[in-house]
Image (cartoon, rainbow, N blue to C red):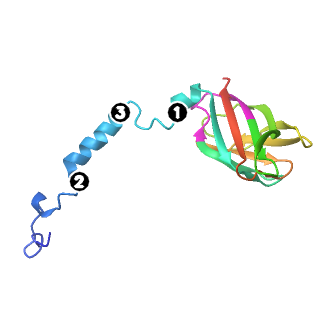
């Protein structure tokens, strides 16, 4: 660098003025074209069509949910397509650690419900579906679940009592497309 070829009098900067480490327009265009033409450039993510046809789950580490309050949970997802209803079988699985910090079978809560009809873009939110959670070591409780606002949206949950799962515990949400 160090050359002032673009000042006094003004002249365009030429390729020789740029360090070799800077990507040139042609190189960038080739990288972008390869990415856009790749069949699946991000295999770690589900494509919208894969999501809408696949059984799916996501996991949230150590969730804390306030009682009687709607809260966003998990990733933003598109739960339907334009002009089509969708019905999802949803299962919630909370795994708590025991007092020693171990994940054991008798410290879990699980329940399922039907979440539907969710169109591709919700503008008004209802009360969602009520999922009764069965528990091994405690009284059962309920969680209302619904899709949030917008096209790509998070699930929202509203438990009837506080949920505080400490690490290494988690919430796993299973979804199965029914319609």
> Is tag 1's residue or tag 3's residue first in the polypeptide sequence?
3
Please tell me whether residue 67 is drawn above or below residue 8 in the rendered image.
above
Question: Does the CB distance between marks 2 and 3 fall below 8 Å?
Answer: no
Residue 47 appears anywhere in the view: yes
Instruction: Kindly check if marks 2 and 1 are in contact, taking CB atoms under 8 A apart as contact.
Output: no
Give the CA separation, mark 1 to mark 3: 16 Å
Magenta stretch holds residue 82: yes
Which element carries disc 1, helix, strand or loop?
helix
Q: Position of residue 14 (x, y in %)?
A: 11, 60
Q: Is residue 19 left or right of residue 175?
A: left
Q: Quadrant of the C terminus?
A: top right
| Observer-nearest of 169 and 151 | 169
Q: Which residue is depicted at the point 14% across and 69% down? A: 1
Residue tagged by mark 2? 23
Q: Which residue is mark 1?
A: 48
Q: Nearer the viewer, mark 1 or mark 3?
A: 3
Element assignment for label 2: loop
Taking the spot 50% from the left edge, 37% from the top edge, the residue there is: 45
Rounded to the nearest angstrom, the CA distance separating label 2 from label 3 is 21 Å
Determine which residue is flagged by label 3. Answer: 38
Question: Which span is picked out in magenta?
Answer: 77-91
Q: Position of residue 145 (x, y in %)?
A: 76, 41
Coordinates of residue 97 in the picture (x, y in percent) = 77, 47
Residue closest to the eye, 49 or 140: 140
- Indicate which label's residue lies in the foreground, 2 or 1: 2
Q: Which residue appears farthest toward the left when viewing the image?
A: 9
- Callout 3 secondary element: loop
């Amino acid at each position: 660098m160090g050359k002032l070829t673009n000042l006094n009098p003004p002249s365009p900067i030429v390729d020789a003025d740029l360090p070799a480490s800077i990507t040139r327009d042609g190189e960038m265009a080739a990288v972008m074209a390869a990415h856009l033409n790749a069949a699946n450039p991000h295999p770690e993510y589900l494509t919208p069509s894969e999501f809408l046809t696949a059984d799916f789950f996501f996991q949230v580490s150590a969730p804390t949910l306030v009682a009687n309050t709607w809260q966003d949970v998990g990733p933003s997802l598109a739960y339907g397509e334009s002009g089509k209803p969708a019905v999802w079988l949803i299962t919630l699985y909370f795994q708590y650690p025991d007092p020693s910090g171990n994940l054991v079978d008798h410290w879990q809560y699980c329940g399922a419900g039907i979440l539907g009809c969710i169109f591709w873009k919700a503008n008004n939110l209802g009360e969602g579906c009520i999922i009764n959670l069965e528990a091994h070591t405690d009284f059962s409780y309920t969680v209302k679940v619904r899709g949030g606002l917008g096209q790509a949206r998070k699930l929202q949950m509203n438990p009837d009592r506080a949920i505080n799962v400490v690490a290494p515990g988690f919430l796993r949400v299973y979804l199965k497309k029914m319609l």
